Amino acid sequence: MSALVAVARAIWGETLSLFVDDGRFAGAILVWLVLAGLVVWRLSPPPVLAAIGLFAGLAAILIASAVREARRRRRG
Amino acid sequence: MTWAHAAPTILAAMAASLVEFVEALTVVLAVGVTRGWRSALTGAGLALLVLATLTLALGPAILQVPVRLLQIGLGALLLLFGMRWLRKAVLRAAGVIPLHDEAAAYESERAALSQAGKARSAWDRLAVSTAFKITLIEGVEVVFIVVALGSAGPAALAAASLGAGIALILVIGLGFVLHRPLAMVPENTLKFGVGVLLCAFGAFWVGEGMGLAWPDGDLSLAALVAGFFAAALVARALCGAPREAVA
């Protein structure tokens, strides 16, 4: 039974880590999605502008997070 | 469903599943060679049964959720999953973190299983649970990708399932013929490409869920793929010297 629980725990941990292994990175993505959602909902910007804004924020988060992680690992 | 959606869906599901199945095959092979094939195949088979049940239950159930809620929820999860993959692929391509080595993983798993001692009963619990765990863990990722990419409707679900099915047959076939880990698969290049596709799909779904009318409809998906690919290349360049080609 304890072996089964250990396997179940390992699977649950792995499943969670599919989406979040760096809290700041995941948090930044979610915050940007909420902000973009609010802007689209409340301000109804032109679709091209909204699309570019949504993508640009995500791209910036990806680049900034990768660079930050590279610097952190090279320092450590 | 247009080809603009079906082709990237099949491709993304196939490439992502290929990476996951190759990782599972490495451990199942190590279990089979070290502890016996009966236990290895029993563990892997049980996990495939659980995964098939999960897919059959989740797939149709998820299509019952209101479309916009589904697009936002699965889109956000796809973005979290895809951007995590893409960032890791960027860091590996830039030489910041080591590339995943299937041959080394295989030897390490074999050594660990050999040291564990022989099974006391006819059922080798360690072997069955090791094969079960790795197949289920990697398989859950495949199920998530298939369900998320297939959330646009039954046609999309069929396309994503087709991609994953092709990958499964390919990996089982190669494993059966070669009997060694598939170290020749360019895993990081695949992860880079799949990460780009998952991010594009995720952003597209979230945008649709928010009520954003994508300019030029489905063609925006191609623009998102190009955009995330460019962003990943910029990130790799800023992270340091490239160590592995990504295309």
Image (cartoon, rainbow, N blue to C red):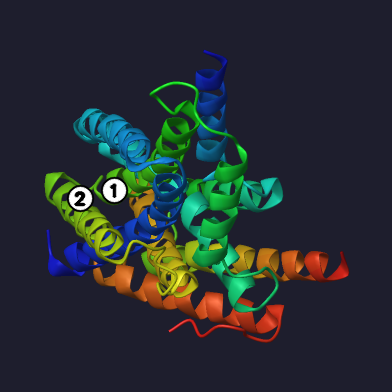
Q: Secondary structure at mark 2?
A: helix
In the picture shown, does residue A25 fall above or below B185? above
What separation in Å lies between label 1 and label 2 (alpha carbons)?
6 Å
Q: Residue at x 24, y 48 (%)?
A: B150
In the picture shown, does residue B124 fall above or below B234? above
* Observer able to see residue B198: yes
Q: Are marks 1 and 2 in contact (CB under 8 Å)?
A: yes
Q: How far from the left and from the top, in percent, is residue B231?
A: 54, 76
* Observer able to see residue B217: no
Q: Residue at x 46, y 51 (%)?
A: B30
Q: B204 or B167: which is nearer to us?
A: B167
The residue identified by callout 1 is: B146
Q: A17 or B151: which is nearer to us?
A: A17
- Is the residue marked by circle 1 packed among few (<14), some (14-19), or many (20+) residues within 10 Å? many
* Residue B233: mark: none
Tell me the quarter of the image containing the C terminus of chain B: bottom left
Q: How far from the left and from the top, in percent, is residue B191?
A: 45, 66
Q: How far from the left and from the top, in percent, is residue B110?
A: 54, 51
In the picture shown, does residue B121 fall above or below B17? above
- B234 vs B24, left or right, is right
In the picture shown, does residue B151 fall above or below A67? above
Mark 2: which amino acid?
Answer: Ser
- Is the residue marked by circle 2 packed among few (<14), some (14-19), or many (20+) residues within 10 Å? many
Tell me the quarter of the image containing the N terminus of chain B: bottom left
* Residue B161: mark: 2
